[in-house]
Structures are given as C-alpha cells and as structure tokens.
Image (cartoon, rainbow, N blue to C red):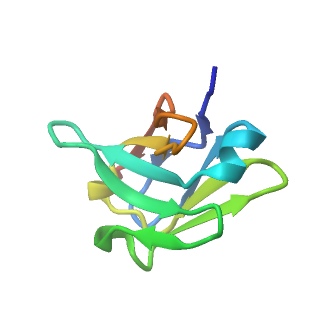
C-alpha cells in the first residue's frame, strides 16, 4: 500500500514561514512527479507546485516568489517551503503524485495550514 505521509502544518502569523514535508516509498519517489495541492473551505482543490523526478518545477501564479518546492532523493521526501504567508494561503495542503504507467495517483492525508494574527 503506497502512502504519502505529510507533516509540518500549523498556525502562523501573516508574513511568517512554514515548511511542509511529504515522504513516500523509494519506488514511487524515484519514478514520478511529486506535488502539493491545497483546498480552502468552500473552494476547489488547487495546484500549488509540482516537481518532476528530474527536477523540473511548476508553481501556481499565486505562490510564485513566495513558495519553494524541492526534493531530497536520499530521503524520498518532497518539501514545500512557504514564506511571506498570507491569510489567503490558509487551507488544507495535500501531497500528491499523479502516478504513471504502473501506479494510479495517490494523495496524502492533508495537513492544515492556518495564517492568522
């Protein structure tokens, strides 16, 4: 059973920073794109950032210049460094892989990020 295990959410003041982590199996991590999505109350889930197995990165316009996605291949972990956080970044953040030839997509359990003073 493939698992994506997230950590690092919490409550932070506007302008603050948080780092999310997502670990999975070596097989999944080495083969597929990894990414982060978020879902705010009453809104659809939206893409935040993705990073391919070769390191190509894509960001949503709303987070460009503030968030950084990276991957540690030795630890099979993808990170999302979030700086200059705004109240509108408040959401449940989900780790995701779209899978590919041999695997379906997988989602993490979600981690709450709340930006509030």
Q: Residue furthest left?
A: 42
In screen coordinates, is 14 left or right of 96? Answer: left
Residue drawn at x 51%, y 45% is 100
Q: Is residue 53 above or below residue 31?
A: below
User: Which image quarter is the N terminus in?
Assistant: top right
Could you tell me residue 81's position as x and y percent?
57, 62
Q: How many marks?
A: 0
Q: Is residue 14 above or below residue 64?
A: above
Q: Is residue 115 above or below residue 14?
A: above
- Front residue of 103/46: it is 103
Q: Residue furthest top?
A: 1
- Front residue of 109/57: it is 57
Residue drawn at x 65%, y 68% is 54
- Front residue of 98/60: it is 98
In screen coordinates, is 28 left or right of 14? Answer: right
Q: Quadrant of residue 66?
A: bottom left
């Amino acid at each position: 059973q493939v698992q994506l295990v997230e950590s690092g959410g919490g409550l932070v003041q506007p302008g603050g920073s948080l780092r999310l982590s997502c670990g999975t199996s070596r097989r999944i991590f080495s083969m597929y794109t990894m990414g982060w999505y978020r879902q705010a109350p009453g809104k659809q889930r939206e893409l935040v950032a993705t990073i391919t197995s070769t390191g190509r990165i894509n960001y949503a316009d709303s987070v460009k210049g503030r968030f950084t996605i990276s991957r540690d291949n030795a630890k099979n972990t993808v990170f999302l460094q979030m700086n200059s956080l705004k109240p509108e970044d408040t959401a449940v953040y989900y780790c995701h892989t779209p899978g590919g030839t041999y695997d379906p997509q997988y989602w993490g359990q979600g981690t709450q990020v709340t930006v509030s003073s």
